[in-house]
Image: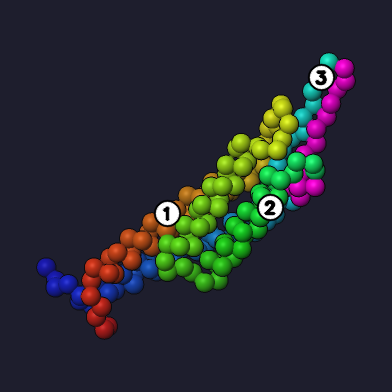
Amino acid sequence: MTPRGTTEDVRSVQDGYAVADRYVRFYPVMALGTLALAFLPLFDDVTFNDGAATVRDTYGTVFDMARRPGGGPAVIGMLLLFGLVAMLAVATFAPPRSAGLPSAIAVVAALIVLLLITKPGTDTPKPHLSDGGTAGLVLVICATVLGAAHAVHLTVLARRSRQRPAVSV
């Protein structure tokens, strides 16, 4: 059994951060994918007969929905989207050493998931997700899981490094 605070313990924590930095490889791909999917329609068009006439609802991209009357949820979605892309970019160029940024990525991505599933601001009948909307939903679910896993990993590493006294290598 080795004494606490040995060079081996320090290397173990450093190796842990090297492993934690591997999460960062996924962040630029998610940022670019999320930004690209913002320019695709989220929902399929809806056609229904209200008895007197056939009505067709077209939703378009998140930007198109934000311009419509009642587009408040789409504006919130745009803010969340740009916030997520910005956080992913920051995490790409400055790999986090604490759980704060990955946790924020997970929370913002989870809010986007909630918006895509509940579809606020859409009429009845609710539209189905388009192919682009489905891809966006999968991408933000992955961002939620990746951000949460990264945050947990960094939290465990921080606890491990606090438990062991620092030793010069």
Mark 1 sits on what residue? 149
Residue lying furthest top in this view?
51
Q: Is mark 1 on a helix, strand or loop?
A: helix
Callouts 3 and 2 close, C-beta under 8 Å: no
Which of the 4 image quadrants contains residue 50? top right
The boundaries of the magenta stretch are: 52-67
State the residue at coordinates (42%, 54%): 149
Q: Can residue 51 be seen in this view?
A: yes
Indicate which disc, 1 or 3, sits on the residue closer to the N terminus: 3
Q: Alpha-carbon distance for marks 3 and 2?
A: 31 Å
State the residue at coordinates (38%, 62%): 154
What label sits on residue 78 in the rendered view? 2
Three-letter amino acid code at the position of disc 2: Met
Q: Can residue 61 be seen in this view?
A: no
What label sits on residue 50 in the rendered view? 3
Q: In this view, does 168 lie to the left or right of 82?
A: left
